């Protein structure tokens, strides 16, 4: 069982925004900062050789998680850059071939929705797939949306606000009969749900380090070959030959090594982590059950470390204030927390505006201690 601890610092329950760094990953990152600080592009001495070897090992560690080849892994600053590179990097090829229709869903992260808006400004036509009240795309909706000139489909792996897993395997099955490129923003699912991303029909996968207990500032794009042909991506930046000319700049060896180890640990410890997260979820929901919270989305499809819930007639801000000394939670995506507009994800699911104002997202990890659940429940009770 997760440990219940008493402490003055609130327990961090916002892992979908960013996760704590895994201690073994932190140790490796520090080693590459303090001792193995060589540039992987330096070919004349051992420091550079060891740096290059560390990067190639990370490619192997990451590629094995998704059943890809190491040379199909390209390092970026994070999933946002990977999303942009996957989507906008295809533009020249899609324009050349007249494939100017693209498809995404209404619940994507802004890192996908805004590049798609840019495609629209460049003359592409766009279809935004609706989602069910359970928070997922129906494969039939994709079937109906496909056109002969559809060049790209982008659907996320798991939603950052609700934790609902999308039916990526079923969507890939639809695309088996269509040549469009298939991109999956896997920022929230990589290293947690494994078989899905091993599907060979997924062409492009965006990965974020700080969602799997690696540092911020590092991510990857997996560009899987079809047959022997890699997706025809054009670089968005210029200034060096790194990453086979696709993404220039000196490689941050310490961050890349950390992402590689985090990926390997996620694969090796998946069952232990999953068990912890499920026990945590059970204890949390059991403690809050007397208040009959509404859970947003189809819970059969929900990741075990996330819950989006609402207490009837209790504003989310009031609950967060009541819990501020106990837990750190959010009421939406960290990337749009500066805006007070209703969640586009919950709106797309058909949740009423009044219910959206009461919604809270709690997300944890295998590193998270159980908070003082009795005090959390008492705080909610006092608000009623």
Image (cartoon, rainbow, N blue to C red):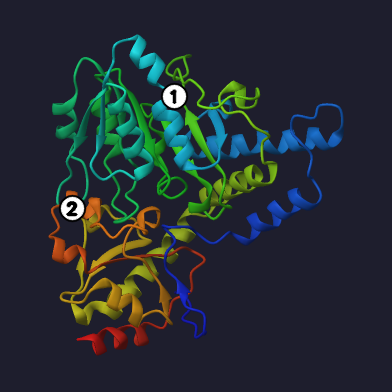
Neighbours of disc 2 within 10 Å: few (<14), some (14-19), many (20+): some
Return the residue at label 1. 89
* The quarter of the displayed image where residue 309 is located: bottom left
Return the residue at label 2. 347
Q: Is residue 312 above or below residue 182?
A: below
Ranked by sequence position, the earlier of labels 2 and 1 is 1
Label 2 SS? helix
Neighbours of disc 1 within 10 Å: few (<14), some (14-19), many (20+): some
Q: Is residue 203 visible?
A: no
* The quarter of the displayed image where residue 381 is located: bottom left
* The quarter of the displayed image where residue 93 is located: top left
Q: Position of residue 119 (x, y in %)?
A: 32, 27
| Quadrant, the N terminus | bottom left
Q: Position of residue 50 (x, y in %)?
A: 78, 37
Q: Position of residue 102 (x, y in %)?
A: 27, 26
Label 1 SS? loop
Q: Is residue 321 left or right of residue 236?
A: left
Count of numbered labels shown in the rendering: 2
């Amino acid at each position: 069982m997760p440990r219940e601890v008493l402490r003055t610092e609130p327990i961090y329950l916002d892992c979908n925004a960013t996760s704590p760094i895994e201690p073994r990953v932190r140790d490796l990152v520090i080693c590459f900062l303090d001792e193995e600080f060589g540039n992987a592009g330096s070919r004349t001495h051992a420091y550079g050789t060891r740096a290059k070897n560390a990067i190639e090992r990370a490619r192997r560690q990451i590629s094995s998680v998704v059943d890809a080849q190491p040379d199909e892994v390209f390092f970026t600053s994070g999933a946002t850059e990977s999303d942009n590179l996957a989507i906008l990097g295809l533009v020249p090829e899609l324009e050349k071939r007249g494939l100017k229709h693209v498809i995404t869903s209404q619940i994507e992260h802004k890192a996908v929705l805004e590049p798609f808006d840019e495609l629209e400004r460049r003359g592409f036509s766009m279809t935004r797939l609706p989602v069910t009240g359970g928070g997922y795309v129906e494969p039939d909706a994709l079937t109906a949306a496909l056109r002969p000139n559809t060049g790209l489909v982008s659907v996320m792996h798991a939603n950052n606000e609700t934790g609902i897993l999308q039916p990526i395997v079923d969507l890939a099955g639809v695309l088996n009969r269509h040549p469009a490129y298939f991109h999956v923003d896997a920022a929230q699912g990589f290293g947690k749900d494994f078989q899905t991303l091993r599907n060979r029909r997924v062409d492009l996968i965006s990965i974020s380090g700080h969602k799997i207990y690696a540092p911020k500032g590092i991510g990857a794009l997996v560009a899987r070959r079809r047959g022997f042909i890699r997706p025809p991506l054009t670089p968005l930046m210029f200034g060096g030959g790194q990453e086979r000319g696709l993404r220039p700049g000196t490689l941050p060896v310490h961050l890349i090594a950390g992402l590689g180890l985090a990926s390997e640990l996620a694969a090796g410890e998946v069952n232990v982590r999953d068990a912890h997260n499920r026990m945590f979820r059970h204890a949390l929901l059991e403690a809050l059950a007397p208040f009959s919270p509404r859970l947003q989305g189809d819970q059969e499809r929900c990741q075990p470390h996330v819950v989006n819930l609402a207490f009837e007639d209790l504003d989310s801000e009031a609950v967060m204030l009541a819990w501020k000394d106990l837990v750190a939670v959010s009421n939406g995506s960290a990337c749009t927390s500066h805006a007070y507009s209703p969640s586009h994800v919950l709106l797309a699911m058909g949740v009423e505006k009044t219910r959206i104002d009461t919604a809270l997202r709690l997300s944890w990890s295998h590193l998270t201690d159980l908070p003082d659940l009795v005090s959390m429940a008492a705080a909610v009770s006092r608000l009623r």
